[in-house]
Image (cartoon, helix red, strand yellow):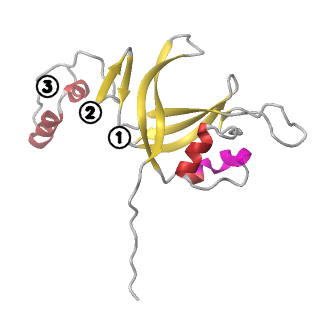
């Protein structure tokens, strides 16, 4: 067993013992399931063939739009493992104004979208930001600036999707019920 494989199979106490003594410590118990970094040390429960992972802190990374069914995909990064976690919202990807009104916007990374009134995205925005953007069709321009300093949490599940190139089922992480984590900021108190 090489050193990387040994480190993956060691418990935290075994790894600390090896680090402090400098002597290799073999793991006491072998892992039977393949190593999945997003399941490590997380309280989880199984529902059918899905693995639900709870209470992870997420930071906003970027967004994408899809042309097939008009989804907005917010991409978050798990602060513990660095894994990519996706949240899905239904949006309209057609242009709302101008000569191209009704035509599809460019989709993909940082694509344009319009969240319909009473949509879950608008509810999410108002809970996180508290004020509407200048125009809802411009919300894609303000996502990074408004969400980059906030932390989020939600119910994370491991799901499967079909890879377009290979046709195989590929696991990914999906978050639902995304909520903002209340943060206590560091306030600078000045005396006069």
Image depth: mark 3 or mark 2 in front = 2
Identify the element where label 3 is drawn. Answer: loop
Q: Which numbered marker is on residue 41? A: 2
Which label's residue is closer to the chain start, 3 or 1? 3
Question: Residue 76, percent across and down?
Answer: 49, 39
Q: Which residue is mark 3?
A: 27
- Between the residue at mark 3 and the residue at mark 2, the CA separation in whole angstroms equals 17 Å
Residue 23 spot, x, y in % from top left: 9, 35
User: Which comes sooner in the sequence, label 1 or label 2?
Assistant: 2
Q: Residue at x 22, y 23 (%)?
A: 2
Q: Within 10 angstroms of label 1, few (less than 14), some, or many (20 or more) residues? A: few
Residue 175 rendering spot, x and y as whole percentages: 46, 32
SS assignment for the magenta stretch, majority: helix
Which one is nearer the viewer's eye here, 7 or 153? 153
What is the magenta range?
136-144
**Residue topped by disc 1:** 80
Instruction: Report if the CB atoms under discs 1 and 2 are less than 8 Å apart.
Output: yes
User: Residue at position x 53%, y 33% from top?
Assistant: 87
Task: Mark 2: give few (<14), some (14-19) or many (20+) Cα within 10 Å.
Answer: few
Q: Which image quarter holds the N terminus?
A: top left
User: Is 118 on the left-hand or right-hand side of 151?
Assistant: right
Q: Quadrant of residue 90?
A: top right
Q: Gap between marks 3 and 1, in whole Å?
A: 23 Å
For label 3, the crowd category at 10 Å Cα-Cα, with few meaning under 14, some 14 to 19 and many 20 or more, is: some
């Amino acid at each position: 067993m090489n050193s990387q494989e040994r480190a993956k199979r060691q418990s935290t106490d075994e790894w600390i013992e090896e680090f402090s003594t400098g002597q290799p410590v073999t793991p006491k118990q072998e892992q039977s399931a393949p190593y999945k970094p997003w399941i490590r040390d997380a309280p989880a429960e199984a529902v059918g063939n899905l693995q639900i992972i709870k209470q992870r802190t997420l930071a906003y990374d970027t967004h994408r739009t899809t042309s097939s069914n008009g989804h907005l995909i917010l991409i978050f990064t798990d602060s513990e493992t660095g894994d990519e976690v996706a949240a899905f919202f239904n949006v309209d990807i057609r242009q709302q104004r101008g000569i191209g009104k009704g035509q599809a916007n460019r989709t993909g990374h940082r694509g344009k979208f319009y969240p319909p009134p009473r949509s879950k995205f608008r509810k999410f925005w108002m809970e996180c930001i508290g004020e509407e953007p200048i125009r809802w069709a411009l919300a894609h321009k303000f996502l990074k600036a408004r969400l980059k300093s906030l932390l989020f949490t939600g119910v994370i599940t491991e799901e499967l999707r079909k890879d377009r190139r290979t046709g195989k089922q590929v696991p990914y992480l999906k978050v639902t019920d995304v909520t903002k984590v209340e943060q206590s900021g560091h306030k600078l108190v000045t005396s006069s």
